[in-house]
Image (tube, helix red, strand yellow):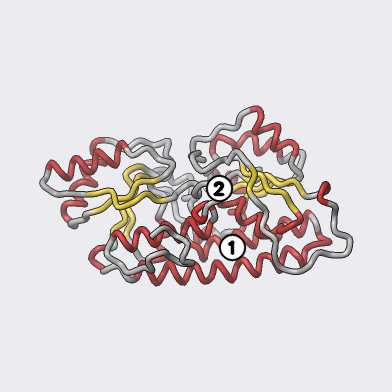
Amino acid sequence: MVKKLLLCSLIALTGVMSVVAGGRSEPDDVRSTDDLIDIVATTGMIGDIVAHVVGSRGSVFVLMDDEIDPHLFRPTRSDIARMQQADIIFYNGLNLEGQMADTLVQLARERPVFAVTELFEESVLLEDEDDDDYFDPHLWMDVSLWMQAVEKVVSAMSEFDPARADYYRDNADAYLLELAELDAYAREVIASVPANRRFLVTAHDAFQYLGQAYGIEVIGVQGISTESEAGLEDINSLVNFIVRNQITAVFAETTVADRALMAVIEGAAAQGHEVLIGGELFSDAMGPSGTWEGTYIGMIDHNVTTIARTLGGSPPPRGFRGRLSP
């Protein structure tokens, strides 16, 4: 339990995330373009929140791109130098960026560093089934929970730049309305899947919050951290579960190798049961920058729409905002 609390309070996509403007008009003493707040976020999901909240007042740089697994990410010298230039840093916490812990502690001695998960009560966090010293860090899979992360960013930015607290609050409120609509959409489309088909088998255990929020049983081939490896016993047990429940589709992930998933498919085939890959989901990273799936809303839209369609539900052909590929 001590580790859980410490890692949350400790004080990162190579590239620049576009900043989203919105909300109230700028104060009269608005800074010049050259005086934007320089912000670094570790993951795209964090960067997307920050960009919505800071609007035109900040430049958001995201360390990990859409192909990077944050569980395994080790910052390079250039990454550390980039963070040292930042005015403020945001990261997920709960050991998601476990290889960065020491670096974040060092940086926090020189500038504000915030874990967005600091806001959450332990009662809403799921435990890591493989290590009870840690919590599951994948909170963004439950949109209603991730809305609380927005509040953490608003609080941090208002503390850092109090003259624009109202501006940040208005931007956040506009974004939260969109997220509330997304949450309702996710509930609706997953509920459209027949009850006896609500099984989500994925490459690693990143979807438990999604399962709890939207009523679908989730089974990962690997554990919560992709540093863990699925053993033969784990794979055989999952194969037996799939055959017993007549599950016909499993899901790959964009940042996780599918070797273990293929072993599950082959194991089911050896028992005379055909299982297909029903699609590729975004788990620890969003889609490519500049695409709909490269936003948090687009990421969740893609995931829940793909899951529902594959498992026999009835989502709209092009998803939440009509922007997914047919």
Counting residues from the start of the chain, the first of labels 2 and 1 encountered is: 1
Q: Decide: marks 2, 1 in contact (CB < 8 A)?
A: no
Residue 217 location, x and y as percent?
Answer: 32, 59
Answer left or right for 138 relative to 114.
Answer: left
Would you say 39 lies left or right of 322 here?
right
Q: Quadrant of the C terminus?
A: bottom left
What separation in Å lies between label 2 and label 1 (alpha carbons)?
24 Å
Extreme residue toward the left, this view: 272
Location of mark 2 (residue): 289
Q: Which residue lies furthest to the right in this view?
A: 29
**Residue drawn at (56%, 32%), measured in percent from left and top?**
74
Front one among 280 and 127? 280
Residue placed under numbered mark 1 in the picture: 148
Quarter where residue 271 is shown: top left
Relative depth, front residue between 256 and 297:
297
Can you name the residue that lies furthest to the top here? 77
Neighbour tally class for label 1: few under 14, some 14-19, many 20 plus, Cα within 10 Å = some
Residue 102 sits in which quadrant? top right
Indicate which label's residue lies in the foreground, 2 or 1. Answer: 2
Q: Disc 2 on helix, strand or loop? A: loop
Q: In this view, does 151 lie above or below 272?
A: below
x then y, percent, for residue 85: 75, 37
With 138 as the anchor, is 229 left or right in this view? left
Q: What residue type is labelled 1?
A: Gln
On screen, residue 241 above or below 173: above
Query: Whole-percent x and y of residue 119?
Result: 61, 58
Name the residue rendered at 62%, 44% in the picture.
62
Helix, strand or loop at mark 1: helix
